[in-house]
Amino acid sequence: MPTLETTVDGLTLPNPFIIGSGPPGTNANVIGKAFDEGWGAVICKTVSLDAEKVVNVQPRYARLRSRDTGEIIGWENIELISDRSFDTWIDEFKEIKDKYPDRILIASIMEEYRQEAWHEIVERCEAAGVDAFELNMSCPHGLPERRMGAAMGENPDILEEVCGWVMKVATKPVWAKMTPNVTHIEDPTRASLRAGCQGISAINTIRSVLGVDLETLRPEPTVEGYTTPGGYSCQAIMPIALRMCMEIATVIRDEFPGRSLSGIGGIETGKDAAQFLLLGCDTVQVCTGVMKMGYRCVHSMQEELLAFMEQHKFETLEDFKGHSLQFFTTHSDLVRRQAEARAAKKAEHDKKVIQKDTDWDGDDFVDQTDALSRG
Ligand SMILES: Cc1cc2nc3c(=O)[nH]c(=O)nc-3n(C[C@H](O)[C@H](O)[C@H](O)COP(=O)(O)O)c2cc1C
């Protein structure tokens, strides 16, 4: 019987399915629900020291549906980080760890460009008992106006400096969460890993405009007639997330062996998760999927991942982590491989075509006849 249990950066998880930062980890009540349903770990909604500056609007989501089935396949949000006070969060971190001492609680944190602020948030979260950190360097809307979130994550120099501040005081594992809104995801990856972060999480949402209402001529989600570009998530982003995880995993394999990767983006099934693990992820995170399907979806996800492992006779996640990375190459190498395969096929065919009567062979007689025939 294969096992889903895994140890990443010294944290032991019953399975690799983690609640990604967002509404599904937004207070102690729902975090408890996630643990009760069996999620491998929970990353809380991003917290900051001064929640009074966080002011949300409604509506803040807009959803894209499949033309054929009506299923939600894309999701834009203009939601900010948590609007709950830091003191409340500290009390709830303690409460959760008292109730679930063996489960992994990861604090997603974000602060302004001030070393003392980052030190304070890390030290107070650690004192409250959290097991690890995820640095939100990637929120694409609202916060960049305050030079937070993606404003840091899009600039490798600032990212390296801020990650370095965190690494000076953190005694627990730290993952840096990447924004996909960059040309080369390898650059912020290297910056965070150079600064000493134990792992990378990828991806946050993709900057998007979900659509324009053809009656009102207003873009969605419309707030008092106006909008602002938001973050795109759900099924539709999985191919982009897989590509970026593949690129990050390749950097880790070649330049930072031993660092970890948590894959995020459109994961809704155990088969989706298997693909992220095959491309080098240690764990996977689910955010929008939980908003669509509820916390219980982790049951079928685990069953599907176990069935995949049984099919291939994998005993542990380690047995197939990163297995499919070896099958990526350059386009010119694909051209070379195809030319070689075609030449080999032609040589095989030519062998069957009789050049002179001494070539006829008793065993290949029918194939040789076919090779000389039309129709
Ligand atoms: C409504 C909503 C709120 C989110 N809030 C946060 C957040 O506070 N911090 C963060 O790091 N990511 C946040 N995210 C991003 C998710 O954690 C995740 O990176 C992204 O949505 C892609 O994964 P998914 O397709 O499974 O949702 C949010 C996503 C959504 C949809």
Image (cartoon, helix red, strand yellow):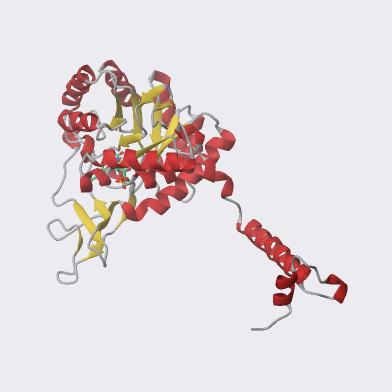
Horizontal relation, residue 298 to residue 312: left or right: left
Q: Quadrant of residue 211?
A: bottom left
Q: Quadrant of the N terminus?
A: top left
Q: Quadrant of the C terminus?
A: bottom right
Horizontal relation, residue 225 to residue 8: left or right: left
Q: Position of residue 331 (x, y in %)?
A: 61, 58
Q: Position of residue 205 (x, y in %)?
A: 33, 48
- The residue positioned 16% from the left and 25% from the top of the image is 88
Q: Position of residue 158 (x, y in %)?
A: 43, 36
Looking at the picture, tell me which residue is in the foreground, 216 or 199: 199
Count of numbered circles in the view: 0
Horizontal relation, residue 172 to residue 312: left or right: left
Looking at the picture, tell me which residue is in the foreground, 298 or 119: 298
Q: Quadrant of residue 199?
A: top left
- The residue positioned 37% from the left and 34% from the top of the image is 16
**Residue lying furthest front:** 362
Up-down: is 29 above or below 78?
A: above
Q: Position of residue 238 (x, y in %)?
A: 38, 51
Looking at the picture, tell me which residue is in the foreground, 214 or 56: 214
- The residue positioned 22% from the left and 35% from the top of the image is 25
Horizontal relation, residue 166 to residue 255: left or right: left
Ligand 1's quadrant is top left
> In this orientation, does residue 313 appear?
yes
- The residue positioned 16% from the left and 58% from the top of the image is 222
> In this orientation, does residue 79 appear?
no
Up-down: is 347 above or below 316?
A: below
Up-down: is 243 above or below 341?
A: above
